[in-house]
Amino acid sequence: MKKRIKELRLAAGKTQAEFAETLSVSRGAVAIWETVDDRPPSSVTISLMCDKYNINRQWLETGEGEMYRSLPRDSEIAAFFGTLVSDDNDERSDLKRKIVQLLAKMTPEQWEALAGIAESWAELNKNEGQD
């Protein structure tokens, strides 16, 4: 489990101290989880990790399955907006907020234009994947 906890932390872009803060534990606890085989976090902390970072508990505990739980589209969007308004330490948060603000002000015509761009981009990426 220690390797998967470290993988989760790195995927979240967190230092041990930042990761510890999100779980209300000490940085030392995170260091122990990442280095000692027989010192996993408590069941409650594992549940919190899985909930906070959308992690598949089976993957975290055993390595089986996918790392992330799949979310319904609306839940995924809600989770994004939740992190957008609560994560002031993320250096990209300001950019994300500006993009969302611009999207909120778009006219139906601008949405149509954006949809056309997205479709063209998806088609381009699809064709590049076939090379």
Image (cartoon, rainbow, N blue to C red):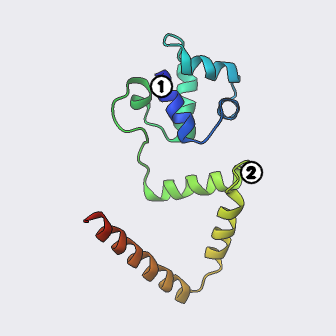
For label 1, the residue is: 3
For label 2, the residue is: 88
SS at badge 2: loop
Where, by quadrant of the figure, is residue 12 drawn?
top right
- Give the mark nearer the N terminus: 1 vs 2: 1
Quadrant containing the C terminus is bottom left
Tell me which residue sits at (69%, 35%) in the image: 18
Q: Position of residue 52 (x, y in %)?
A: 57, 39
Q: Residue furthest right?
A: 88
Q: Residue furthest left?
A: 130
* Amino acid bearing label 1: Lys
Tell me which residue sits at (52%, 35%) in the image: 8
Q: Nearer the viewer, residue 72 or 17?
A: 17
Tag nearer the camera, 1 or 2: 1
Where, by quadrant of the figure, is residue 95 drawn?
bottom right
Q: Position of residue 128 (x, y in %)?
A: 32, 68
Up-down relation of residue 80 to residue 12 (above or below):
below
Tag shown at residue 114 = none
SS at badge 1: helix
Q: Residue furthest top?
A: 38
Tell me which residue sits at (57%, 31%) in the image: 48
